[in-house]
Image: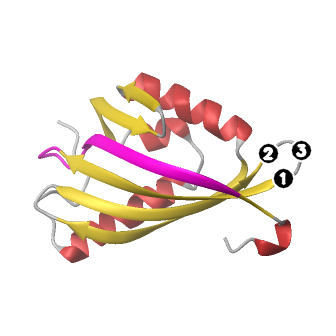
């Protein structure tokens, strides 16, 4: 059985470790690597899209990072319970025309006993920015 440490129940310290691992993985922009943190049947809501399973996650992230160029993400701890973590985040990216954006959002994560994320619900808003306004 595959395991992704740290495992629940989370402490504040282990929740922050989980968040940093997710940030590091997402910043690789490698859909297969990112998908390994999720259960085979993981459920996602990302904005208005609903996904189920690693194959859909990989397809979604492949499409995402083909459009969101120079993507850079930062995740921050918000709260946690036994097997759940709440995260706030921001990321920056540019489109093919060179327009930069900063996205802000919140995620609610639920993990199985092996430390794999079985549910991810994300609410995200985008703000167009100038290149000189970039922070990440």
Q: Which mark is residue 91?
A: none
Where is residue 63? Give x, y as percent: 63, 30
Q: Would you place residue 52 above or below residue 30 in this image?
A: above
Circle 1 sits on which residue? 99
Circle 2 sits on which residue? 95
- Look at 20% across and 66% down and name the residue there: 80
| Label 3 Cα neighbours within 10 Å, binned few <14 / some 14-19 / many ≥20 | few
CB-based contact (under 8 Å), mark 2 and mark 1: yes
Secondary-structure class at tag 3: loop
Q: CA distance from mark 1 to mark 3?
A: 6 Å
Q: CA distance from mark 3 to mark 2?
A: 5 Å
Q: Split into 4 quadrants, where in the image is the N terminus?
A: top left
- Look at 22% across and 39% down and name the residue there: 2
Where is residue 82? Give x, y as percent: 10, 60
Secondary-structure class at tag 1: loop
Of residues 114 and 82, the one nearer the viewer is 82
Q: Is residue 124 magenta?
A: yes
CB-based contact (under 8 Å), mark 1 and mark 3: yes
- What secondary structure characterizes most of the magenta part? strand
Q: CA distance from mark 2 to mark 1?
A: 6 Å
Range drawn in magenta: 112-127
Secondary-structure class at tag 2: loop
Q: Quadrant of residue 50?
A: top left
Circle 3 sits on which residue? 97
Where is residue 135? Give x, y as percent: 69, 74
CB-based contact (under 8 Å), mark 3 and mark 2: yes
Tell me if residue 34 can be seen: yes
Relative to 100, is 87 on the left or the right? left
- Look at 42% across and 64% down and name the residue there: 88
């Amino acid at each position: 059985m595959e395991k992704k440490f740290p495992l629940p129940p989370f402490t504040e310290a282990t929740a922050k470790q989980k968040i940093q691992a997710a940030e590091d993985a997402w910043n690789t922009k490698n859909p297969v690597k990112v998908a390994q943190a999720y259960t085979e049947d993981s459920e996602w809501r990302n904005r208005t899209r609903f996904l189920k399973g690693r194959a859909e996650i990989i397809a979604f992230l492949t499409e995402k990072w083909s459009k969101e160029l120079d993507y850079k993400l930062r995740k921050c701890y918000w709260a946690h319970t036994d097997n759940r973590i709440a995260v706030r985040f921001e990321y920056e990216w540019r489109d093919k025309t060179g327009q930069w954006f900063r996205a802000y959002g919140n995620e609610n994560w639920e993990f199985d006993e092996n430390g794999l994320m079985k549910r991810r619900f994300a609410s995200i808003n985008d703000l167009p920015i100038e290149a000189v306004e970039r922070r990440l």
